Image: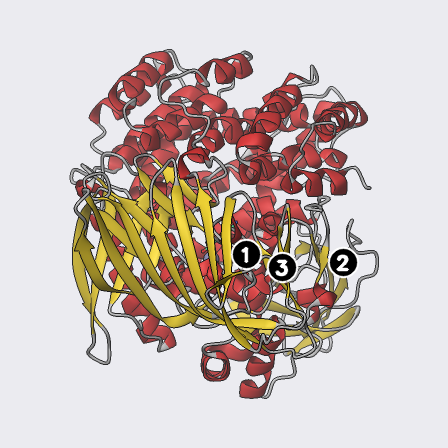
């Protein structure tokens, strides 16, 4: 029953709609009583049956128009009401359910987090609270009355505006909330707890005053400021760049410790994983600061792209997620550095989304078939979805894109829309034909572009021939040609741009583009700014790559050719490894890097990004069949060689950077990144131990502390143990900070790293029911420690399987995320494949296998 697939093509309009819901919640962690009184309307007069979704609670009673009603059938996923012979045009249902939030470890529906109680309803969690038409195209107005113990839960929150409150004689109190905006039930939220509150306000461009409230656990106010400032920046930016203004009188954010993902955009009441709220210089790194700002913005931006305009059905998820990721990426780019943001996003996409698209989970950004919706909050729907929006932006330009946005908002406000509605608005507003472009929504897989060129001296003509091919994926055997924007520029031998950046529209299988009036054979900069989420093949010589590294105006291009240089060294040496030959590192590349460091002051952010050696897992994506041992050995060699050969320049740069005061500014972040990049390499040289120890000792912020600790553990300098112990002693009371320590432990290069990880599961700061801890220790081990997890003794696989069996019971959603490295077995050699498949078979035998795990195992084993 629960493992039944749903198909996009089967979408049907609802037979009934709900206009209003009154929720009376008598809250208690052991026994919560929910009385839901809803106004239904039948919109399909033919129907005599009302099917409601609901499970995981105790069903107490049902009334139809205030009368007890018994004409229903209950099963393990819902309730079917038989309305034959009854006037059911308009009616009310009163449903009473009983819940136990304290026992709900799935962290969906209503659950206890720490001392508080909160909800998570997206995608289908509301049905764990009461019976409901739990689908995003049923929009209702909510009134929520919460009653609970006043001392334990002084704050009782829900969506919308507070309309009434009062005290009861038994020590309980109640608050009533009303949300004037009709919404799908996945946007419902409720929070009860004792918090410290940071209050602020924002005046919208039309002059309305919005109260801003940020709720954090008591004692955490000193870590709340950055999130609040971020919110205000996001509100302002959305008005300026997209013309979109906030609509309610109050905006609340609550930080909780137990949360399955990053955050949730519930109308007027965002609930956040505390990881994406809490920050001060002592506890958060520069990276954390930027991530917090971006998630705060992302959830805020959903108020328009997600809440005001929601999805017709869950297959359309990218309508709100792809678009909102695009919006948060643009926000960060506008506020910080456009090139830096682009580089980080592309690095992430290539290492993770490309891998997903080459896995059994491959699916289009608008999936066709789903068993467990939570499995489709993927990098494909989110990140590739954002790339698809970005390509439209590239094809239309900012002005026409904004025109398209305005049309989309005007047409769809207050409705549940589809991806087609969005593209259609873009096409009509711009007059640009997007008919072929739409295939990006239905086709999975990473397209491959093969580029060849020729130069005709006599005609002074340079031609680029670009061919496209999307290799078949597990979900889709037939592929079509896509409309791909390819941004290119041409450089002459002196490094001058002889053809400025221009967007070529590739629509056919193979196309030739000519550039006239080109005096000498140029070097092409291809896919500038990563204008499309594709893999690119062009036979660059080392000389050409170095030329672009030096002269390209586009910072992304410069970073990208450095990636190609690293890839070239890696590939060559993996072959050497397999042939038992010595490793080599071309001197011309080393000297180019040396020069870059010498001149880092011109562009410290870019230099640090260029010289960051890709992680083993990033390198792995360059291969069809991954050899973890070879990749790790070569990467170690590259790290060591770069460290030794660049040492004088690294030391000089390191010593030239002195930041006394910690400031979260673009300039300081870039300089810290550069200094810590130097430290990271220098740790592998003779000065390593002393330098790392000093760096740790003098650090006045978490960015530097963690940089020292990471450098120490990765390079295995003698002081590593002492520093790890010092950090542990200092932070063991704080799970969020300890996550950084757990993650470092999980990626240690020592041979006994797995035993260590297993031991750490008993650490007082570890908690198996907290997804952040599980991800930091176990997730990082399985996903980032390429060598140890894939050890041929098979212990890494067995360990993960044991964990997954436990999580299948306690938190299937987290289990389904964690299983990813196992289902990707086809990327490894036969021996590892056998071991990994054995692990999956074992999981498959588990009784009560959740839909979440079932769906992925089924796909992986090809059933
Ligand atoms: N919309 C939520 C994600 C919900 C995930 C449900 N499994 C957060 C976001 O994307 O903003
Ligand atoms: Zn989102």
Residue 345 or residue 223, whichever sits in front: 223
Secondary element type, mark 3? loop
- Residue 71 numbered mark, or none: 3
The tag earlier along the polypeptide, 2 or 3, is 3
Can you say whether 333 is above or below 519 in the image? above
- Residue 765: image location, x then y, percent: 36, 22
The total of numbered circles placed on residues is 3
CA–CA distance in space, label 2 to label 3: 53 Å
Bin the neighbour count of mark 2 within 10 Å (Cα to Cα): few under 14, some 14-19, many 20 and up: some
- Residue 568: image location, x then y, percent: 64, 40
Residue 390 or residue 650, whichever sits in front: 390
CA–CA distance in space, label 1 to label 3: 43 Å
- Residue 437 numbered mark, or none: none
Tell which residue pokes out farthest to the front in this image.
67
Residue placed at 34% from the left, 42% from the top?
Answer: 117
Of the two numbered discs 1 and 2 in the rendering, the one whose residue sits closer to the viewer: 1
Residue placed at 71% from the left, 74% from the top?
Answer: 513
Of the two numbered discs 2 and 3 in the rendering, the one whose residue sits closer to the viewer: 3
Query: Looking at the image, do the residues carrying marks 2 and 3 touch, with CB atoms under 8 Å apart?
Result: no
| Residue of label 1 | 382
| Residue of label 2 | 470
Query: Looking at the image, do the residues carrying marks 1 and 2 touch, with CB atoms under 8 Å apart?
Result: no
Residue 377 horizontal side relative to residue 284, left or right = right
Residue placed at 46% from the left, 37% from the top?
Answer: 104
- Residue 410: image location, x then y, percent: 46, 84
Q: Within 8 Å: ligand 1 and the Cβ of disc 1?
A: yes
Image coloring type:
secondary structure
Can you say whether 644 is above or below 544 in the image? above
Determine which quarter of the picture holds residue 266: bottom left
């Amino acid at each position: 029953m629960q493992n039944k697939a749903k198909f996009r093509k089967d979408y049907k309009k609802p037979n009934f709609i709900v206009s209003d819901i009154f929720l009376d919640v008598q809250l208690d962690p052991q026994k919560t009583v929910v009385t839901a009184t809803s106004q239904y309307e039948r919109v399909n007069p033919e129907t005599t049956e009302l099917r409601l979704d609901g499970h995981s609670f105790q069903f107490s009673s049902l009334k139809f128009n205030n009368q007890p009603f018994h004409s229903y059938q209950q099963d393990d996923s819902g309730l079917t009401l038989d309305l034959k012979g009854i006037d059911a045009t308009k009616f009310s249902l009163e449903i009473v359910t009983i819940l136990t939030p304290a026992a709900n470890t799935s962290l969906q529906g209503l659950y206890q987090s720490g001392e508080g109680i909160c909800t998570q309803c997206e995608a289908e969690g509301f049905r764990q609270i009461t019976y409901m038409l739990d689908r995003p195209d049923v929009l209702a107005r909510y009134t929520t009355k919460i009653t609970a113990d006043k001392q334990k839960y002084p704050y009782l929150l829900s969506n919308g505006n507070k309309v009434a409150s009062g005290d009861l004689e038994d020590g309980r109190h109640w608050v009533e909330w009303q949300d004037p905006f009709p919404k799908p039930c996945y946007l419902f939220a409720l929070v009860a707890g004792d918090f410290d509150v940071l209050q602020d306000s924002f005046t919208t461009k039309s002059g309305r005053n919005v109260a801003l409230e940020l709720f954090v656990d008591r004692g955490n106010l000193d870590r709340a400021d950055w999130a609040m400032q971020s919110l205000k920046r996001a509100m302002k930016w959305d008005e300026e760049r997209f013309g979109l203004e906030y609509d309610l009188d109050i905006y609340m954010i609550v930080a909780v410790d137990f949360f399955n993902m990053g955050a949730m955009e519930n109308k007027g009441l965002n609930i956040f994983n505390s990881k994406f709220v809490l920050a001060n210089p002592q506890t958060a790194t520069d990276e954390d600061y930027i991530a917090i700002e971006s998630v705060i913005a992302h959830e805020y931006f959903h108020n328009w792209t997600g809440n005001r305009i929601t999805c017709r059905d869950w297959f359309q998820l990218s309508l709100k997620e792809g678009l909102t990721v695009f919006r948060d990426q643009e926000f960060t780019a506008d506020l910080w550095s456009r090139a830096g943001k682009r580089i980080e996003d592309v690095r992430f996409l290539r290492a993770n989304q490309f891998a997903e698209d080459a896995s059994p989970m491959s699916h289009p950004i608008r999936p066709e078939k789903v068993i467990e919706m939570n499995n489709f909050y993927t990098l494909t729907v989110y990140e590739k979805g954002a790339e698809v929006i970005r390509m439209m932006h590239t094809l239309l330009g900012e002005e026409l894109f904004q025109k398209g946005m305005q049309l989309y908002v005007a047409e769809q406000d207050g409705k549940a829309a589809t991806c087609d509605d969005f593209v259609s608005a873009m096409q009509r507003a711009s007059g640009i034909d997007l008919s072929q472009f739409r295939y990006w929504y239905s086709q999975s897989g990473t397209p491959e572009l093969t580029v060849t060129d020729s130069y005709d001296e006599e005609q002074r003509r340079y031609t680029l021939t670009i061919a496209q091919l999307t290799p078949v994926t597990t979900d889709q055997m037939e592929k079509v040609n896509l409309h791909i924007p390819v941004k290119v520029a041409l450089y002459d031998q002196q490094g001058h741009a002889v053809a400025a950046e221009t967007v070529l529209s590739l629509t056919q299988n193979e196309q030739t583009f000519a550039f006239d009036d080109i005096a000498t054979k140029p070097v092409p900069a291809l896919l500038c700014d990563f204008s499309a989420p594709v893999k690119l093949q062009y036979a660059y010589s080392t000389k050409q790559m170095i030329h672009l590294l030096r002269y390209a105006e586009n910072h992304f291009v410069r970073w990208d050719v450095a990636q190609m240089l690293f890839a070239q060294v890696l590939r060559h040496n993996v072959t050497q490894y397999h042939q038992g030959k010595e490793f080599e590192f071309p001197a011309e590349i080393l000297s180019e890097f040396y020069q870059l460091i010498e001149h880092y002051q011109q562009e410290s952010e870019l230099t640090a990004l260029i010289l960051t050696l890709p992680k083993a897992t990033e390198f792995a994506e360059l291969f069809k069949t991954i050899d973890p041992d070879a990749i790790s050995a070569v990467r170690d060699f590259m790290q060591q060689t770069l460290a030794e050969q660049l040492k004088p320049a690294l030391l000089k740069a390191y010593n030239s950077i002195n930041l006394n005061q910690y400031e979260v500014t673009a300039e300081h972040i870039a300089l810290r990144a550069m200094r810590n990049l130097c430290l990271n390499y220098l740790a592998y040289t003779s000065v390593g131990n002393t330098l790392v120890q000093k760096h740790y000792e003098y650090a006045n912020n978490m960015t530097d502390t963690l940089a020292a600790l990471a450098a120490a553990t990765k390079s295995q300098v003698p002081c590593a143990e002492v520093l790890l112990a010092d950090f542990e002693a200092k932070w063991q009371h704080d799970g969020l900070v300890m996550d950084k320590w757990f993650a470092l432990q999980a990626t240690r290069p020592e041979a006994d790293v797995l035993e260590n990880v297993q031991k750490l599961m008993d650490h007082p700061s570890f908690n198996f029911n907290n997804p952040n801890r599980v991800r930091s220790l176990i997730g990082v081990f399985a996903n980032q420690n390429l060598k140890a997890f894939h050890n041929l003794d098979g212990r890494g696989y067995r360990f993960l399987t044991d964990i997954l069996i436990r999580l299948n019971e306690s938190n299937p959603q987290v289990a389904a995320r964690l299983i990813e490295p196992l289902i990707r077995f086809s990327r490894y050699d036969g021996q590892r494949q056998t071991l990994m498949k054995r692990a999956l078979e074992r999981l498959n035998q588990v009784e009560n296998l959740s839909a979440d795990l079932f769906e992925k195992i089924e796909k992986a084993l090809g059933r």
